[in-house]
Amino acid sequence: MQHFTCVCGHLLSVNSKEMSATEHACTWETVSDAVSHVYTSACINRRSACSDMLTVTVGDTVYGDLLAFGTSYAVSIARLIKPHSRDKGFTTHTGFRIMGLLLGHTAPVNCVRWIRSAGLVEDSRPYLLLASADNKSQVKIWSCTLNSLLNKPWSTRGGNWFPLVDVLIPSSEIPNAVDGFVLWRSTSDGCCVVSLDVVADTRIHVWHFILRESQTTESGPVILCHRVTRPPSYATILCRPSMCLCLRSFCWLASATQVIHFVIVGLDTGVTEIWAEYMTPTQSEHVTDDGDCARFIRSARLTGHTDWVRCLDLCRDSSTTTLSLFLATGGQDNVIRLWHIFDATQVPDKATMKVCDLQLPLPPDAVRCTLSIASESVLSSHENWVTGLAWAPRTRAVSFPPLLLSSSMDQSMIVWAPPDDKVGLWLEHTRVGNSGITGLSFLDCLWLPSDGSAIFGHNFQGSLSSWYHSQYDGLWSPGFPLCGHHGPVMDLSWSAVNTSASPFHLLFTVSSDQTVRAHAPLRLESRINSSDCFNDVSELYDHLWHEIARPQVHGYDMNAIASLSTISYVSAGDEKVARVFTATRSFVDACRQMLKLDDYPLGDNLLSVELAASSLAERAVQPTLGLSNQISVPSSVDLLDDAVTDSTVDSDNCVASSCDAPLPTEDRLQCATLWPEIKKLYGHPYEVYCLAAHPSRMLIASACVATKQIHACIILWNGLADWAIHQRLVHHQLTVTQMSWSHDGQHLLAVSRDRTWSVWSPEQANEQLPNYILTAFPAKGQGHTRIIWTGAWCPDDRYFLTGSRDKCLLVWCAPKKRAPAELIAVSCYPLNVRKVFLDGITALDVCQCSNVDPAVVSYLVAIGFESGTLILLILYRSVLMEPADLRWSAIFSLPPPWSHVPGKQVRRVAFEPTTFEMTGTTLTPVHLATGATDGVVRVFLIDRQRLSACLLAPYETVS
């Protein structure tokens, strides 16, 4: 048994008598040029305060905007990309690209917040700090150096993030919000103080840490405790019996030596409380190590809301040295209240309007000062709960206070502003949102922090909708949403095409969130804007991936999908029926325009001929209380523009889509990109579990959940006869977990829960639609000992591989071609290249590897594990050796930012369809798609020539 650690830290184990003793794992530095991460689809967790944005600046240079949000058990880091089109008639829009995941939480992340400078002007720290908290009371502070963000290659520029602080909230309380700030000290030791505030259940928890700037490492600053043998100082404030729902904190420098730390919290009683503590210059006496909160006092108690205070936000006036701060609070009473905190001695005209004075926790020898708070205004325009508030960034504010953005469960967001700078008279400036009955409520809202030219809304299903402000006409136009599945990804499938010169492949994904989603690369012939992004102007990218359609929004959790072509697929939910779908004419026209495919016919491979777009349905609609998408005849509605309103609802509750529109916005994805259902496939007694499409698209294989052999049969559906049942294949005793057709269509591989596999072959050769019979199965005691999750064919169909929960990867020879009279089921033995890992194998796929050397035949294998790990390795042999004499290359494990959440099973990995190239030709890069139960879909671009050179480099040339 051999053990070794990959660059990502995952311990792998390999057991093979035939393997070289020098086998090892390749490091990330070795293969960084061969594998690039091009796309991640993920959603924001269904919690308010679970996303935040920050502008990255160095000196006076703005490098761009970072978005951090919680997705499943991880924190995603995304960057805003602003491409500039070279084509005069083609418009590209700003969109987010997820660069990586921060892994370490063991429960869903509830809240995320950037830790900013406590001063009015951002400091020049060479690192960033990010706080996150999860559902199991774990709070983390992540650190990343600016150099790792700015100087790394684009494909890896998510930054080198490391957990700096890891604390656990006492009593296992569930956090609702987190905030904090960095306070620079005037001492010469290069230290600064980080304050971390968390509200959980009925308590406010406060930590203080000291960071030593002079000891900054690659991961960020070195954290110091107040005392070497004791943890950082900690305090807790009890608000019982009220639940703490939202939080903001800030500090006020009353004088050069007087610092007051304020914590503002919204309660479920409709009250907003302000707590304060005096921070001593040494930061060692303000609170004892046992959690005593004697130094915290309640400065003020603000009433007015009649229901829960769900959100709040602060903004400070940077034009004055005195404190002038606006506080906005939003509640479930549909009302927003504005409060003004000010120095009463500096603003005498407001002294009569004040609600109360803040009690300040100053020591007896401190300089006396007074802060007051006044009720500024009450904003009432939302028709449901106010869920998010955000003040516009200072760069956009001409005067103080700036614009205010609010989000609500009424499916709208409102930009508020005092007209003509008359503070006190706040009116609705702009209203945006999702229209139609299918519109979704918003849970939070954000401004673009660099210039305030965009607003973002986090909706109930985890998507981040965007609107961009035009300087020419003053309108807000919808942009690309950041979206993904909000449930486990169960299956994925690349679209199949007739020609090897296909310009693109659609990627279909299904999830237990009851949706089917289509992803595609937007073809760009433009350079990324270097002033807004983190890259060099010499970098050129021709694709930017997006979700372009949501063909199916079902009433059942989705289990499986099999693509028939670029415009048709078969899917199965958690029901006994499989369903066949085709695209709409509006989708085909939009694809041709968006993806620049005007000269490429989107053919329907099901019929093996090009299907005229005019014969497709114009659009589809899902009727009320129905599960089947139906063809809908469009009523006379105007095509939609790209301004504030981008959809129109007709009598069918369907949004008509314009072919001239950009990539779909979130409300279009909800209902304007549906595909009509053309056929239901009845035949299984229980829920359909897996599907597989024949390469010629003439057959579809399906299997269902089963505990008996009679129910575990595989059904073959005839695509040439209106999807009638062609044949039932009976062999397995339990559920068939996955099926895979060989590339030439001559064999069907099925793997099962009964720990066996089966291979089915045509009974008669040269038949257009033959019957299939069992030709191979594993010999007793020679296969897997646990459930077999996955199987895949090598691209030349000489071998197939199977992976199991027993942690073994086995390689088998394909059945030999025999005369019809000699077709009998043969028991098979695995080849002597068994690999054993420390985790169960749940997904695998194989594609052709480098073929430059005519003396070596090699296959690239991608494997996904129960632990969420992804690895790549090569199976190869010399043409001079026996076909069974195979060897394994070194292993490359994808780094943690590109992997899936630990403990979340990888459900499917799949290389995009490619044709088998003859020896001596140069292979083009290939895409690899992965999906897991963390709800994340990833796409990687692999340079097979370079990867082959890296993984096979440690071995001598096979002779």
Image (cartoon, rainbow, N blue to C red):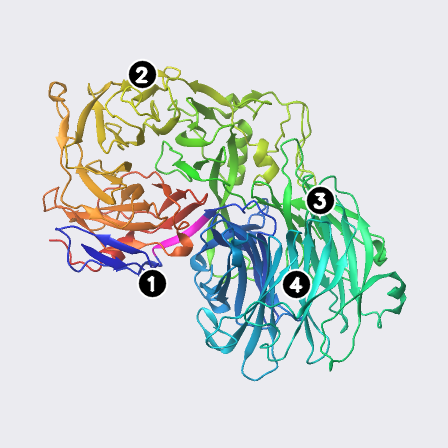
**Nearest to the observer: residue 946 or residue 666:** 666
- Callout 3 amino acid: Gln
Which residue does the numbered mark 3 point to in the structure image?
332
Vertical placement of 449 versus 87: above or below?
below
Whether residue 656 is visible, yes or no, is yes
Residue 726's disc number? 2
Q: Is residue 770 found left or right of 342 in the rendered image?
A: left
Q: Secondary structure at mark 4?
A: strand
Q: Secondary structure at mark 1?
A: helix
Where residue 544 appears, as percent x and y from the top left, is 49, 48
* Residue lying at 81% horizontally and 50% vertically, measured from the top left: 378
Of callouts 3 and 2, which one flags the residue occurring earlier in the amino acid sequence? 3
Where residue 837 appears, as percent x and y from the top left, is 25, 49
The alpha-carbon separation of the residues under discs 3 and 2 comes to: 58 Å
Where residue 172 appears, as percent x and y from the top left, is 51, 54
Q: Secondary structure at mark 3?
A: loop
Instruction: Determine contact: label 1, label 2, CB under 8 Å.
Output: no
Residue 29's disc number? 1
- The magenta span reads 34-39
Whether residue 660 is visible, yes or no, is no
The alpha-carbon separation of the residues under discs 3 and 4 comes to: 22 Å
Q: Is residue 779 found left or right of 188 in the rendered image?
A: left
Instruction: Determine contact: label 3, label 4, CB under 8 Å.
Output: no
- Callout 1 amino acid: Glu
Of callouts 3 and 4, which one flags the residue occurring earlier in the amino acid sequence? 4
- Callout 2 amino acid: His
Q: Nearer the viewer, mark 2 or mark 4?
A: 4
The alpha-carbon separation of the residues under discs 3 and 1 comes to: 52 Å
Crowd band around label 2 with a 10 angstrom C-alpha radius: few (<14), some (14–19), many (20+): some
